[in-house]
Image: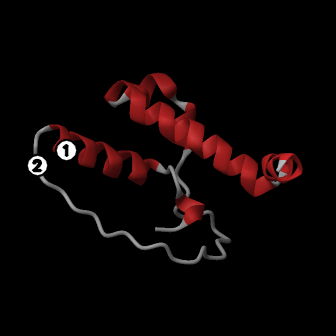
Amino acid sequence: MKNQYFGDIGDYGKYGLLKFLAQHDVKIAVNWYLTKDEENKSGDGKFAEYLEKDEEYSKYDKDLFGTLMLLGTLFSMMASGPLLTAIIRTS
């Protein structure tokens, strides 16, 4: 897992599948590990445009879609600085 790819279309599919399995009493275990972000000159791997297509993609899992949209927005704001600065100033 890499922070730079959080919330992309692959995550939507992964989390959706895990949620479906858990809701159907399938015991699951996940062993993810976080690795360093890569310098990504080509933009490869950041497929989050689906989050801009609410009507097309949210129909599969509205709660998961909304959560990824919210967390992706917060993550982007933190990465760009304003939210992180606001949090630090209020601490």
Q: In the picture shown, does residue 6 fall above or below 19?
A: below
Q: In the picture shown, does residue 23 fall above or below 84?
A: above
Disc sitting over residue 26 in the figure:
2
Residue 21 point in image, percent of width and height: 17, 45
Rendered residue at 26%/42% (across/down): 19
Rendered residue at 42%/73% (across/down): 33
Residue 39: name its quadrant.
bottom right
* Residue at the extreme right: 89
Q: Between marks 2 and 1, how big is the CA–CA gap? A: 5 Å
In the picture, measured across the screen, residue 20 lies left or right of residue 40, that is: left
* Of residues 37 and 50, the one drawn nearer to the viewer in this rendering: 37
Q: Does the CB distance between marks 2 and 1 fall below 8 Å?
A: yes
Rendered residue at 74%/52% (across/down): 78
Residue 70 point in image, percent of width and height: 58, 36
> Which residue is identified by label 1?
22
| SS class, disc 2 | loop
Q: Residues within 10 Å of mark 2 (few under 14, many from 20)?
A: few
In the picture, measured across the screen, residue 35 lies left or right of residue 56, that is: right
